[in-house]
Amino acid sequence: MVIDQRVIGLALVSLILSALVVFTLARETPDRPLEILKNQYPTVLPAGETAFSFAVVVREKLPGLKILFSVVTPAYPAQGDLIDPQKQYRSQDTPQDVLANLARLGWFRNRTSSLGIEPNELSRPISVGKSQFRMLLQDYAASLGAVLGENATLNVPLIFGAMINETGYACHLEGEPGFFHLPEVNINVLTISCNEDEKKYVQDEKVWEGSGQLPLSQAPRGVVEFQSLARDDIITVIITAEPRTFAAPSYRKDVALIQVIRIVVDGQLYDEPIVNVVT
Amino acid sequence: MAAALLLPLAAAQDAFKPTIVVYSGTDTTIAHALASLIEQDARFHGETLVVSSPSAVTLATVLPTAQCIVIYSDHKDHLQGLDLTLPPFLDEGGGLVGMRDACYEPSARNLSRNVFPVYGNFSLVKTSIAQKRVRTYVGVGTSEVTSGLPERFQLVSMGIFLCADENGTYVQVPGSYQVLYEDEETGAPLVLAYESEGAGRSVAMPGVMVVKTPRVDVYYGTLLADGNFVKLFTNSVLWAADSPRFASLTQNLEGKLATIENEKQALKQEGQAARKKDRQKRLATVVVIWAMGLAACALITKKLILAPVRTGAVDTQP
């Protein structure tokens, strides 16, 4: 059988043109520089060990990527800490009204804002059980940490928050940058990896020589930072925690903890912060 | 116009006023009285801030304008968590003045060793009012804290916290602190000055022990009306406040904030430039590949499709 040369020619031309189109599509700039592969957390905090996993894949070359973890838990301010300890909130009150009752935040805000230091604010509706809450977080950690240095802000809760539901039930929140609430007590293992390169942190007293594990006290304080990332690099953070400093779920009226994850790409906040509510 | 220009400048100067934080537990009576003593001192040019909870003191440790923190405490609950937050403040060059339980190990834990190195493990408290309840201050060292004060004087007090053996006898703990006044009765320090490696300064006064009840001999009002106490206290605050934290943090604060912002912008621009370069590189590759592909197509068209037509090799049978 003799095949006409023209047919072969047309077939080759079609093949080349299709290959060019496929190549062009494959080389197209992605819409987003990264994609969240996994954000897994327990919605109800169990009594035993539990894991929080977070993973992102880089879709294009990135000079700098930071993933900032912070945790807030319900706070019960002392009487001396509240402007009006007897204050009853109404349904139309806002989280700002709840925060305004916190005496120390008032003078702190006045003094820091006059210095040009402002908090990062995050306002978000959240669901707790069947109840809808409005939540506000004011985070001074980044701005103050930059001025004072990380050591000076250690052990100082610099995230203030409040949530209030439709019945006027309100709750104060307080926290700090970190992978978990009181990491040195509650975290069993913290794993941070970029592709095959993995760092595993365990409680200081459980570090064995030669195990390749690192003490938790040397872990970054809620910050995962990578530079010069290539396309398809995968960053994973797994927090294995055993909550030892939380009230039993049946005694809690509200949340156990709220994990906030912020992604900063080249110095700019990428997308909306991720808010994981654990009851 | 001139007034408009001066206003922001005045606001900035106000913002950088040094702050002395005063804390006396949830009841702020004594704190307000102590703050008033500081404000009345002509040598002081800042502002005072009275706080009423340990969490507020903790927050004050990260206030860039906080120059000195004064603590008078009569209960261990008032000091909760401060053993974690005050040592970094001192290490960063902050000033501290601690009275009463702030120097007592069972209440203050690490504070009584790392910040106010009295190592107080023994409390000598006189509850009987049969005798005049005073502590006699005997000068053993000189510094700005003792300036203008006599070598020996008495201040009303219920007692003293000291480092002692099981018999209650004072035991001296070696350290890099300086005892300025000692207790005539026990020989233990009544005023102790300490400078940390980070140039932070602290003054410990383990023998300031008063009550809020007016009819009692050790009423705080009596102590605060005593000229020697006023001088001792204000000298201590001013000496402790003269540590480098305030100056180093507020000096060029606007510049520091601008630098942080510039770094952020630079990183953003670097990112944008890298992305632009990446896009251009990608476009160039696509253009080259398309050019090569189209050239190949042209060649194929010429050699395989058009050539047979031109040479008449194409079978034109009906």
Image (spheres, coloured by chain):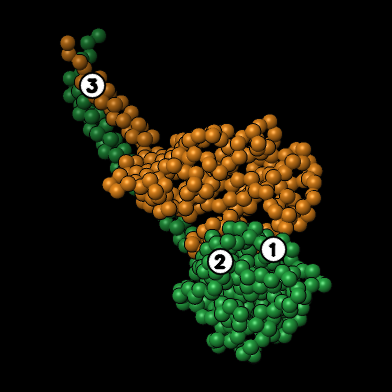
Q: Secondary structure at mark 1?
A: loop
Q: Amino acid at mark 1?
A: Gly
Classify 10 Å Cα crowding around label 1: few (below 14), some (14-19), many (20 and above).
many
The residue singled out by tag 3 in the image is A8
Q: Nearer the viewer, residue A233 or B214?
A: B214
Q: Secondary structure at mark 3?
A: helix
Quote the CA–CA distance across marks 3 and 1: 93 Å
The residue singled out by tag 1 in the image is B25
Quadrant of res A143: bottom right
Q: Amino acid at mark 3?
A: Ile
Residue lying at 39% horizontally and 48% vertically, measured from the top left: A205
Q: Secondary structure at mark 2?
A: loop
Classify 10 Å Cα crowding around label 2: few (below 14), some (14-19), many (20 and above).
some
- Residue A210: give x, y in percent of width and height: 28, 47
Quote the CA–CA distance across marks 2 and 3: 99 Å
Classify 10 Å Cα crowding around label 3: few (below 14), some (14-19), many (20 and above).
some
Q: Earlier in the sequence, mark 2 or mark 1?
A: 1
Q: Amino acid at mark 2?
A: Asn
Nearer the camera: disc 3 or disc 1? 1
The residue singled out by tag 2 in the image is B121
User: Taking the image as drawn, is residue A106 in sight?
Assistant: no
Check the residue under mark 1 and report the chain it is in.
B
User: Taking the image as drawn, is residue B80 in sight?
Assistant: yes
Residue lying at 77% horizontally and 41% vertically, measured from the top left: A168
Quote the CA–CA distance across marks 2 and 1: 21 Å
Check the residue under mark 3 and report the chain it is in.
A
Chain drawn green in the picture: B
Tint applied to chain A in the drawing:
orange
> Is residue B307 found left or right of A156 in the rendered image?
left
